[in-house]
Amino acid sequence: MPVDEPPETKQTLLEVNGLSKYFPIKKGVLRKILGQVRAVDDVSFAIYEGETLGLVGESGCGKTTTARCIMRAMDPTAGEIMFRKASGDMVDIAALPEREMRPLRREIQMIFQDPYGSLNPRMNILDILGESLLVIGGMTDREERSERVAELLRLVGLRPEYMQRFPHAFSGGQRQRIVIARALALNPRLVVADEPVSALDVSVQAQVLNLMLKLQQELNLTYLFVAHDLSVVKHICDRVVVMYVGKIVEVAPTQALYEKPKHPYTAALMSAVPVADPRQRAAMTPLEGDVPSPANPPSGCYFHPRCPYAVDICSQQQPALEEGAPGHFVRCHRAAELSLSGIGDLDRPQTVASASSSDAGVGPIG
Amino acid sequence: MNPDHILSVRDLKTRFLMDEGTAKAVDGVSFDVSPGQVVGIVGESGCGKSVTIKSILGIVQKPGEVVGGEILFRQRGNGAAAAEMVDLAKLDGRGKEMRAIRGSDIALIPQEPMAALSPVHTIGNQLVEAVRLHQDVSKRRAEELAIERMTEVGVPNPAERMSMYSWELSGGLRQRVMIAMALSCSPRLLIADEPTTAIDVTTQAQVLRLLRGLQQNHGMAIIFITHDLGVIAQVADYVVVMYLGRVMETGPVDDIFHNPQHPYTRALLESIPSVHALSREPLPTIEGSIPHPFNRPAGCPFAPRCVAAMPGKCDRRTPKPTQLNGGQSVSCFLHNDAAEED
Ligand SMILES: Nc1ncnc2c1ncn2[C@@H]1O[C@H](COP(=O)(O)OP(=O)(O)OP(=O)(O)O)[C@@H](O)[C@H]1O
Ligand SMILES: Nc1ncnc2c1ncn2[C@@H]1O[C@H](COP(=O)(O)OP(=O)(O)OP(=O)(O)O)[C@@H](O)[C@H]1O
Ligand code: SF4
Ligand SMILES: [Mg+2]
Ligand SMILES: [Mg+2]
């Protein structure tokens, strides 16, 4: 399992360097550009072959925009997206013209959140799954396509007889299996899944998560798993990237992140997860305030207006993303001195230095 | 009706008559609410949670109709006189009596705050109107009360927000305004339909804490609807577990989570990934999917997906709710042979 291996022994499949995506804010008939929404702002991370990398954060933090840039469903404003081709060579797909991008499209596939919206209601399953086999895979023989579709349906646990049916005849969980089958049709190496189970009922969500784990092992897939449910992410991911207002605030192996988060925002996110146990009612000292707009982020550390540990420097200087422990990156001025609680540790967060008088008044606020 | 209860729903049946068939959206639901209690109704999509509360509020729309059962509600008594009881199921949803109850005794926090707030009137106007609907006060006094309410629900700079529109507020603030609105009549029963489903976890934590605090300060009862077992565990005193229009199990929150008796409750609890569980282990699942409401199975609705189903019994007859020790009640033949007659 990649979790225990040092990062050096792992082969990088995708490396994102300084990725940014700005959307212009336009106004008036002249569409004058008034400013920029910095949806993704100087983001860097790597995905290793065979692992599941989680991308978490609250609504609007830039998860989908990051995923869509990697898919080249939109052009990044700046940055590199290095992808290792099957031949072993790395190419920067951020700036690749569509003609050169096309052969790579089969290697990077996407699973969307909404299993209702992403399937054409007027096409049957054979045509839905056969479409990319034909268009991108160049599989012109109808017989061959239908055999491959049958194989794909079996792979995701559906009966091959279902291929004549239309999407409306399937439940939400079955539709998500079809979406997964479509993503796997061309034997991709990287699957970008944007909230793949968020729209599903609990009893069906477990089936789809198990399926994704099984397929990963059988087909040696690499996943970028976008989600906001921290329990689901903990269950399925090897490493996790936490974003806040378009920036990465923390990257760490899953276990380390959940046991000992190093960024105050990560710790706050975790303490806000409602635990399904009435004997563990949270102390409920939630974060105050709202997530700032990426069009107008605060000065210094974007989290400082809500951070219980903020000191003067936090509003003046933006902290850098630094590697505090091997493979554990944090963007916080005080990362080294803070000792934060993860999930399951219900003690109130405390600072290591809080005993010292110089630190008086810096503890958590209610 | 038990004198301890403010609301007693008995064998409620609500159907939707459509060309394709009849959807038994709510099919014999019973539960009670005591004053000051938080009752959580939990269940997967389409199990009838929203239709249940719409039935209570008398706002089920055609082609839906309450076709059976009682909804006994204890109205505010005058002084020492015994409080009066009404069967809401017998009232005309658009009638004067029901409208009065909806406005002053029972309030709703709807799932979609954006849809419930008017985009063309300021927050202040809407709050003032809500206050004056229930209290005969001057406009100025109503404004003061509105600002008080906004302060109470933690809206920063409430006086300034009075002149803002709902679309100018963040999701969390909008939900707080909805709560302020619902509180403006000092209800004794507050119904919240998935009040935190559309908002982020950190905002959800704020709203849950707020509701818990308000419940304690005002002593009102709350019916809290959600599909999130985590949220239920955090807020409810008493839990009603629904599946396909029926109640599978009810009981005190600790029993539901630590001593679940119905196979559906057990399977549901096992299938959620826990932050404490081992990563990457396959999760226990419930086979199959929720049947379409037109295609309801015979007998126990959970029988086709239940690992403990007894062929010849569970797929033929519908189990009756059985009272267990300690306030738990379960509808399952593993606990009692008694079936409902059809
Ligand atoms: N096409 C667009 N034009 C302008 N702004 C956009 C566009 N797409 C996204 N944004 C903005 O970029 C920011 C990031 O959006 P994004 O969809 O990536 O967030 P997300 O993390 O996926 O959120 P969610 O959890 O709600 O899906 C948001 O502030 C959003 O409003
Ligand atoms: N307007 C309607 N017309 C027809 N059928 C309806 C209507 N509203 C509800 N139903 C039926 O009633 C059943 C219960 O719906 P309800 O909205 O109560 O579910 P719910 O438990 O609130 O689900 P969710 O978690 O998705 O909100 C649905 O399966 C549906 O078939
Ligand atoms: S840099 Fe300062 S404000 Fe930002 S998270 Fe760290 S302590 Fe908080
Ligand atoms: Mg998104
Ligand atoms: Mg509902």
Image (cartoon, helix red, strand yellow):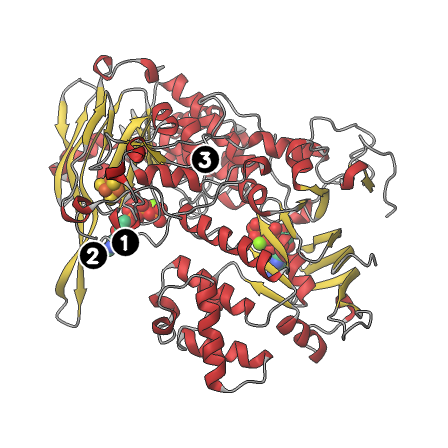
- Is residue A146 something one can see in this rendering? no
Pointer 1: what residue?
Answer: A292
Which image quarter has ligand 3?
top left
Which mark is on residue A178? 3
Residue B52, position as x, y percentages in the image: 67, 57
- CA distance for labels 3 and 1: 37 Å
Q: At numbered mark 1, what does the secondary structure look like: helix, strand or loop?
A: loop
Type of the residue with mark 1: Pro
Q: Chain of mark 3?
A: A
Identify the residue at image location x=23%, y=47%. Answer: A302
Residue B223, position as x, y percentages in the image: 63, 55
Mark 3 or mark 1: which comes first in sequence? Answer: 3
Specify the farthest residue to the front: A357
Pointer 2: what residue?
Answer: A296
Q: Chain of mark 2?
A: A
Q: Chain of mark 1?
A: A
